[in-house]
Image (cartoon, helix red, strand yellow):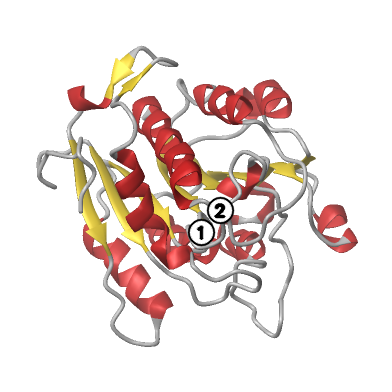
Amino acid sequence: MKLFYARASLEDARIVVCGLPVDKTSSFLPGTKFGPMYIRYCTENIESFSPYQENDLQKLKICDLEDLKLEDQDWYAETRKFVEKHFNPDKKFIFLGGEHTITLPIIEVLRKYYKKFSIIHLDAHADLRDEYLGNKICHATVMRRAGDIIGLENIYQFGIRSGTGQEFKLHKNLYKFEVYQPLRKIIDKIPGPVYLSIDVDVVNPAVLPAVSTPASGGISFQEMIDSILLFKNREIISLDIVEFNPLAGNPYASGTAVAEILRELILIL
């Protein structure tokens, strides 16, 4: 199924949504490959109108490419090929995960179009390990590998509340626990353009429990919305929403929260 408000063709669309249902390296609760499907399903439970932004998705030209169909074992190459085939810098792309590792092939493709850009990363986890369980490329190393591509100094992390001591020492642009206050203070100093990566486990699991690696604490849903609204005047290249796992909790309540996050992100683009 497609998002009900996505009625434009790829050619005519200003905003393009596509699902990357990768779930290959999950270390705790597998199931993120069903995330894009449930986000679309739960979108049927929300309004296209945003009371936060006083705007309506149905005014916009949005295309839904649906999900990448993974056919063989090399998910990384397939994902990168899919992004390469469809990406157009004149449009705004939103990628629905899937595990957080999908960010890496996206960043590789974007690096061909943009000489320099920053990543703003909202997450409960630092994802800065050099390897995890013998893997150099996985959900726990994704920002370390992204740093290999664009430079770790160009990655800004917010809401982090889980990681090794080494991860917390490694990165000076890492802001613990909160998102809105530190982001509000420095967002105008972060060099643009920006790629935004949101792991939904940054939200308190009491509010959004259906994630693959829940972490105690976290921000409120309102803080998430307030943080998104800070991006209204920033140049965003593209963005992703990852780690929603409908098998890990009530898929409908959590899915509705993620669908609303998606709505607000589309509108700030």
Return the mark for residue 40.
none
**Image spot of residue 43 (x, y percent):** 32, 40
**Image spot of residue 1 (x, y percent):** 20, 54
**Neighbour tally class for label 1: few under 14, some 14-19, many 20 plus, Cα within 10 Å:** many
Q: Quadrant of the C terminus?
A: top left
Instruction: Give yes or no for contact between labels 1 and 2 (Cβ–Cβ under 8 Å).
Output: yes
**Image spot of residue 123 (x, y percent):** 65, 47
Q: Residue at x 70, y 49 (%)?
A: 124
Q: Which residue is tagged 2?
A: 210
Q: State the CA–CA distance, disc 1 to disc 2.
A: 5 Å
Q: Which residue is tagged 1?
A: 245
User: Which amino acid type is shown beneath numbered disc 2?
Assistant: Ala
Image side of residue 125 versus residue 67, left or right: right
Q: Residue at x 20, y 39 (%)?
A: 4
**Neighbour tally class for label 2: few under 14, some 14-19, many 20 plus, Cα within 10 Å:** many
Query: Which residue sits furthest top?
Result: 54
| One can see residue 44 in this view | yes
Q: Compare marks 1 and 2 and give the one earlier in the sequence.
A: 2
Assign a secondary structure to mark 1: loop
Image side of residue 87 versus residue 101, left or right: left
User: Which amino acid type is shown beneath numbered disc 1?
Assistant: Asn
Asked if residue 163 is positioned above or below residue 135 in the image, the reply reads above
